[in-house]
Each structure stands twice: as structure tokens, then as C-alpha cells.
Amino acid sequence: MHSTMGTDAQLSRRVWQDRLFKLILVGVALGVVLLLTTIIGFVIKQGVSVINWSFFTQLPQPPGARYSGILNAILGTLMLTALASILSIPVGMWCGVAMAEHPLHPLVKWAQVSVDGIQSIPSILFGIMAYLWVVVPMGQFSAVAGAVALSMIMLPIVIRAVEEAVRRVPTTMREASLALGVSPFRTTIKVVIPCALNGILTGSLLGVSRISGETAPLLFTAFGSPFLVLSMFQPVQSMPILIYNYATSPYADWQQIGWGASLVLILFCFVLSVGTRWVFKR
Amino acid sequence: MTDRWFKIGLLVAPAFLITLVGGMAITLMWGASSSFQQAGWGFYTQLTWDPVHHVYGGGVFILGSVVTTLLALFLAIPIALAIGLFTGYYFTTGPIAVMSQWVLDLLASVPSVIFGFWGLMVMVPAVRHFEMLLGVAPYGVGLFSGAVVLATMMIPLTASLIRESVATVSLELKEGALALGATPLEVVRHIVWPISLPGIGSAIMLGFGRAIGETMAVTMVVGNANHLPTHLFDPTNTIASLIASEFGETSDPVVVAHLIHLGLILLVLSLAAGMLGRYIIRKQS
């Protein structure tokens, strides 16, 4: 029994250590995952009780009133994310294509550093930036300011997705087009971008899902409003701000509406982020 | 000719991006300039934030941010490691692994304000109860609550990154060691751990960068008390939550400049952590 593996006693000790480690590890991992699941469960349990038709079609009411809804917050969030997408997707696509097509250009190298940099900036600082760039010159809080803040958060996500997607277009496709005498310009427009379309779409939707739950950059840009506002140049309500205001309010029925809004927001983010990843993987 | 202009046209976008980032840096520095001039280096050592008597110091918030985040990391790292090894090494396939991954993906997409809401309604009462048992002032909100909520939010992200890093360890190495008679624990210790260490390090750095700038969840449970915590459960404040609660409320340009100054410090901290984390990943691949 004097092999390199040691004696029986050593062997059984090693086996025991292994079992104990696995037991502790699996116990901790599963235990925590279960605990985390209860967070989602809690939001669902609390949220479901207030969600009905009028929840989506009514405006917020004072505490105690029946038939309170979150229509203005839903429309506000749609407005903010739509405008942020309009601002960031074209620039992001343009930038992503440039970075994938000319990876060695010095400008692109600096742009890579910039993308990493933007991704590391805490989201509340985009709020400060949009405040200084848009709110101060305009003289008031507005949907535009909120959308500018959100678009800066979305931009690097779109750029990375587009860059990745364009990189993944097989070289043979590009070469086939060039060999047929198509100019590099037309090759990019007609061959490379259509091939990368799936990735571009995925990136844009991931970006939307990321910004739709952002609260901090909206605090002093879009600000929030109890009214139904459809103007881009006035303060608007949004789902995350509504949740924040209602969560920190002392009224139980407002808090309950906050849970309903949380559930709607989680579902929205989840469907967008996991859903798109799932669909486009196939 | 078109192609030349096309290339130039394409490169306008990266140039714009670089300008945008430069513009952000200049905006913040310009916004904070009067704070630099007035407070100077004393801003970092001054531990009082008292707008009524016009005393502005950033020390409490800088330390508060760092302490809260480090405590959250301390709580989150062992758990994230366990989950990362669990889904990246022990159970890479099968219903349990798929379900766990699914839950983590779902949680990673939950907005932070909802974690804050949960923290306020579920965790804070539990902490308050715990504090009564311990005999400390039962605020419920405070340093500990902030760190627990932060850790909860960090676990899905760091665990996913650790899993990715653990899963890249080559099968041949693992199977080779097993075939030589190593136990799975020894494979983890001598093969998986050393190989995935840079990945784990970068996951921790990225987690730190994300957590230190985390605003909403912390604002809701950290207590927003502008003093240094004297013990684990003391209410305190962080840079991000100070900005969140004060920036929109004030019209005093002095306060605004000091808040932007603090924002700049936050930027430097999270940028350093984030860039370091990404650098490690890039160097590895």
C-alpha cells in the first residue's frame, strides 16, 4: 500500500475532505440561490394583488383613493427609453462598425478605452452630466434631460454588441463581396451590416432593458411628475422613480402600488434581456 | 474615392465618442473647480458636512463608500465563489444548474431600486429585530443593511463572472488530474483555482466598481446620516447616496460644486476598479 497515493488513512481523509467541501459548497450555493429566489417571490406575491386593468389605465391617486394606476409612469418610461434609443442606437451602430472595421486605427484604440471608461462610470454621474448639459441651459427638468442621461448609459452596450456582431461576420462573406468587385463601402452596407443585424438588435434590446430600470440618473433630470405628461420638455414620471417615491412614502397603499410597479418593471426588463438572448441564440 | 471618404466618415464616430468622454471629464472638473479652490485638500480630511454652518467635508462619504463596499465584498465573495464553482464546476449541466443560472440571470436584470424596496420592507425589519437581540440601537437602516443589500445585488454578477472563468478551465487538465487519482477538491485547489484566479480577481474588481457607484438601494437602507459609523450597525452615508439625496434639492452653487467634487472622487474610484478588472480579463484572453 505504499504507493504515491499514501496509506489507507490518508486516502480516506482525502475522500472525507472532498465530500465535506462539496457538501458545504453545494449547501451554501443552493441555500443562497433559494434565498435570492424568495426576493423575486416576494415581489410577485406583493405585486400581483394590486395589478388589474385600472392599474394600467389610471393615473396615480392620493393615498386612500381606489383605482390608482401607473399609466403616466408607464408612458413616461416608454418615452424616455424610446428617446434614449433614438439618441444612442445610430451613434452606437456607427461607432461599433467603425471599431470592428478598423481595429488598429489609433482613434479606435482610444475609443476602446473610452467605451471601457463609460461602462465603469456610476450611473448617477450621468445624471449630473445631463443636469449640467441639459437641465441648466433649459432652466427646468425635462424628459429630454432624462433621455440624454439614459442614452449615455446605453451607448457603450450598443457599441460593444455591434462591434462583436460585425467582427463575427465571416471573412469569407466580405471577401466574396470584394472579389465580385463590390467596393468596400457597399460591402459594409450591403453585406456586413445585414449579416450582423441579429447582434445589433440583441444589443439594442439589452441596452433598453438595462436603462428601463435606471433610477439614479433620472432623479434630477426627468425628475418625476404626478401628471400625465406627453411633452419632451417637461418633467415626466417614470417607473423607477415612481417605485422609489412610493417605496419611501409612509402610506401602505402607495407602497402596495410600488410593488405592483416593481413587478411590471421586473417583467419588462426580464422579457427584454433574457427573452432576446434566448430568441437570438437559436 | 468614396471608400476613402467612407473610412473617414466611419472614424468620425470613434472621434465623437472620445470627445464625449473628454467632455464628461471636463464638465465634472469644471463643475467641481470652485470646490477645489475653496476646500482644497482639506476636503478629504474634513469629517463634517454641515450646510447650515457652511462647513463642507467629503471625508465621511469617501470612507463611507469604501467601507460599505468592502464590507459588501467581504460578504459576497465567499458566496459568489461557492455559486461560481457550483455552476461552473460541480453542476455544469442538469436541471439544478439551469435553474440556478436562470435565477441569477433574472436577478442580474432586476433594477436596483427594487432591491432597495425589498431591503427597506423585508431586510430592515429583520435587521432591526437582530439589533434588539444584540442590544444596539435598533435603527434597522445603517452600514450593515447597506452592505447586505449591496452584497445581494453583487452576488448574481460576480457569481456569473466567476462561473465563466471557472468553466474555461480545460477539460483535459481536470480529467487528467482525476485520472491520476486526485479528488475533485484537489482538482479545484490545484488546477481550477490557479487557472481561474485572474478571472476571479477581475470579477471582484468589476463587482467593487459596480457596487461603489450603486446608488438607489444603498440610499434607501444606509441611514443617510452624515457621520462616520462607530460600529457595524451605525447609520452612515455614501458618496452616491449623498448626491442622490442632495443634488436635486439644492440651488446653492457651493453645495453643487462640492457634490460634483465628490462625484469626481467616486468616478476615480470606480473607474480604477472597473478598468483594472477589464484589463485583467483582456490580458487573460
Image: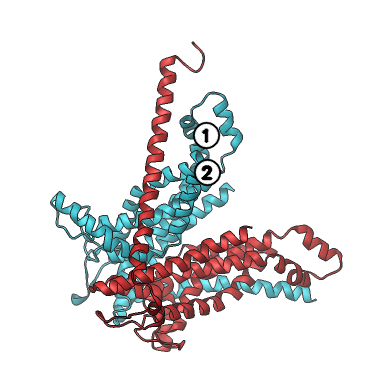
Picture residue at 30% right of the left edge, 66% below the top: B219
Front position in the image: A241 or B253: A241
Say which residue appears at 46% left-offset and 16% top-offset.
Answer: A6
Q: Name the quadrant containing residue A10.
A: top left
- Tell me the distance, in whole angstroms, between the alpha carbons under discs 1 and 2: 24 Å
Amino acid bearing label 1: Ile
Label 1 and label 2 in one chain: yes
Alpha-carbon neighbours of circle 2 within 10 Å: few (<14), some, or many (≥20)?
few
Q: Chain letter of disc 1?
A: B
Read off the residue under disc 1: B191
Q: Position of residue B179 (x, y in %)?
A: 57, 26
Chain A drawn colour: red
Amino acid residing under circle 2: Gly
**Farthest residue, direction top:** A1
The colour scheme applied to this rendered structure is by chain
Q: Which residue is mark 2?
A: B94
Q: Position of residue B198 (x, y in %)?
A: 50, 45
Query: Colour in which chain B is shown?
Result: cyan
Give the answer, above or below, for where A280 lies relative to A254.
above
Q: Residue furthest left?
A: B135
Residue A107 visible? The answer is: no
The tally of labels here is: 2
